[in-house]
Amino acid sequence: MNGKLVPEKAAKVSVFDHGLLYGDGVFEGIRSYNGRVFMLDEHIMRLFRSAKAIDLKIPMTQAGVAKAVVKTCKANRVMDGYIRLVVTRGVGSLGLNPYTCGTPQIIIIAGSIQLYPKKLYDEGLSIVTVGTIRNHTESVNPQIKSLNYLNNILAKIEAINSGCMEAVMLNPQGFVAEATGDNIFVVRGNTLLTPPTWCGTLEGVTRNVVMKLAAEAGMDVREEVMTRYELYTADEVFLTGTAAEVIPVVKIDRRSIGSGKPGPVTRQLAKTFNRFASSNGTPIV
Ligand code: PMP
């Protein structure tokens, strides 16, 4: 916390922190594989962009934050794990004004995560489109990875209450945006489609890696505006995210996608991604 290693029990924040009071802050979720932090610089750059977008000045350099992440992993022996990097607005008065707040708090938690049960990586996920639309790009732009995830949580509640673990969120124009914590991809022949960020998607680090790996494998990779038509008529659909990695989707709104089983392109891309992730990153030393 704020540059110091603190035992879990002593890691506390003030009730006056605007991160708690208003969800005023930004965060990143990062993975480590085989003693390396995966895509550390990309996550830190996005953290600083999110902070800049909400006019929050992180009181540390990007290099300093990167060092602190590695140090926290090392101290907790998190060689294959999940890191939560949080920057809150800091302690302020009981009003919205962020400029009343003192120094932003930098919190790094090194732990683990299992977003979906293991068997769903073999069998595929059933997901559902929900009524909660993704934030308009001129409200809280979905490119800001902010501490206010209620938009996504409302969608997640709808998905869970209709018997699915994940939701597809549409944007205010009715175009596909993303899942509640993952990006979405469509496979159509040799083409790989995903919505552009202006449709209301976070620019996922995993998304970008998968797009690069797919292009290297000879696929025609495109950012395209999509409706539910593209989802329902896809050969394959999958989700990507740091916590989720690459997970196949076999049903959307109770309709079978493609063959109704995880497809060959998704399986190959998941394999390629896992191989890439386990051999690239910043060493935890
Ligand atoms: N969309 C949302 C809303 C997310 O919160 C995340 C991260 N969990 C993603 C997409 C995937 O991004 P990344 O691959 O960088 O984890």
Image (tube, helix red, strand yellow):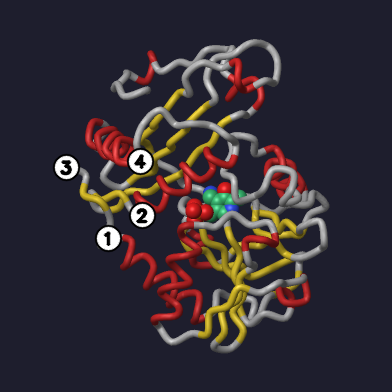
Residue type at mark 1 is Asn
Q: Is residue 67 above or below residue 181?
A: above
The amino acid type, in three-letter code, at marker 3 is Val
What's the CA distance linking mark 3 and mark 1?
A: 14 Å
Query: Which residue corresponds to the image point at 46% horizontal and 44% vertical from the top-left?
Result: 29
Local crowd at mark 3 within 10 Å, few (<14), some, or many (≥20)? few
Q: Distance between the residues labelled 2 and 4?
A: 14 Å
Which callout, 3 or 4, points to the residue nearer the camera?
4
Disc 4 crowd, CA 10 A, few/some/many (<14, 14-19, 20+): some
**Mark 2 is on which residue type?**
Met
- Rendered location of residue 53, percent (x, y): 58, 42
Mark 1 touches mark 2? (CB < 8 Å): yes
What secondary structure is found at the residue carrying circle 1? loop
**Which comes sooner in the sequence, label 4 or label 1?**
4
Dot 2 or dot 3, earlier in sequence? 2
Q: Residue at x 35, y 50 (%)?
A: 41
Dot 4 lies on which element? helix
Q: Is mark 2 within 8 Å of ligand 1?
A: yes
For marks 3 and 4, give the CA distance: 18 Å
Residue matched to label 4: 62
Amino acid type, mark 4: Gln
Name the residue carrying label 3: 285
Q: Residue 280, labelled with which disc?
A: 1
Where is residue 249? Give x, y as percent: 61, 67
Decide if residue 178 is on the left or right side of residue 246. Answer: right
* Secondary structure type for disc 3: loop
In front here: 263 or 153? 153
Mark 2 lies on residue: 39
